[in-house]
């Protein structure tokens, strides 16, 4: 059950959410997507053949499969998150990737290497919980009809 506090209700996906929150979610989504896409994912995609030979294999899937999963998370999921397309679903691979990076791949590299991965993790977790906000493709696609549900639960805002 949610409680009203002025125009804003507590609870995720409330129809009374402050428009400033939607703007903040847009900035957060686009910002994290840009940093991950251009700072990490694009290089791995463009140099896939070279990197596949020496990429870490922390889960025992093989270096090429591990790199492919990281490219999926860092490049393609970042694109989806930036545009707000299947946003909650798209945050899951980067969340897993950042946890693996922080606690397995960079476990012995010191706090600075782990810190970056954990910062990305917490941003993705925030987007997973809060959703994409009003300024997203998800909002345009899944807005049809009152009271219908969005993918992965939560009721749509009007």
Image (spheres, rainbow, N blue to C red):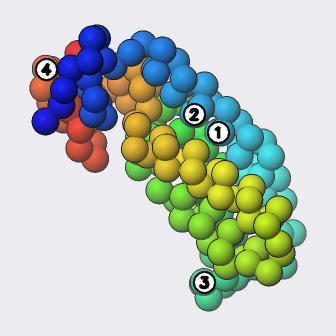
Measured in 3D between alpha carbons, the distance from the residue under mark 1 to the one under mark 2, in whole angstroms, is: 6 Å
User: Distance of mark 4 from mark 1, alpha carbons?
Assistant: 30 Å
Residue 2 placement: quadrant = top left
Mark 2 nearby-residue class (10 Å; few <14, some 14–19, many ≥20): many
Residue 111 picture quarter = bottom right
Near mark 3 (Cα within 10 A), the count class, few <14, some 14-19 or many ≥20, is: few
Q: Which mark is residue 130?
A: none
Judge depth for marks 2 and 3 and give the one in front.
Answer: 2
Which residue matches tag 2?
A: 29
Name the residue that disc number 1 marks. 33
Tell me whether the residue at label 4 lies in contact with that at label 1, contact meaning CB atoms closer than 8 angstroms.
no
- Assign a secondary structure to mark 2: helix
| Marks 4 and 1, the one that precedes in the sequence | 1
Residue of label 4 = 146
Tell me which label, 2 or 3, sits earlier in the chain: 2
Counting residues from the start of the chain, the first of labels 4 and 3 encountered is 3
């Amino acid at each position: 059950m949610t409680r009203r506090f002025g125009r804003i209700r507590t609870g995720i996906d409330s129809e009374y959410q402050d428009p400033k929150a939607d703007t903040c979610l847009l900035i957060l989504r686009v910002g994290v997507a840009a940093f991950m896409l251009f700072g990490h994912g694009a290089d791995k995609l463009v140099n896939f053949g070279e990197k596949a030979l020496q990429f870490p294999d922390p889960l025992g899937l093989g270096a090429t499969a591990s790199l492919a999963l990281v490219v999926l998370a860092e490049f393609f999921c970042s694109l989806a998150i930036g545009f707000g397309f299947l946003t909650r679903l798209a945050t899951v691979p980067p969340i897993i990737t950042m946890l693996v990076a922080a606690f397995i791949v960079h476990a012995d590299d010191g706090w600075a290497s782990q810190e970056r991965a954990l910062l990305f993790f917490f941003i993705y977790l925030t987007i997973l919980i809060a959703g994409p906000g009003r300024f997203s493709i998800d909002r345009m696609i899944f807005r049809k009809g009152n009271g219908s549900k969005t993918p992965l639960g939560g009721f749509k805002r009007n």
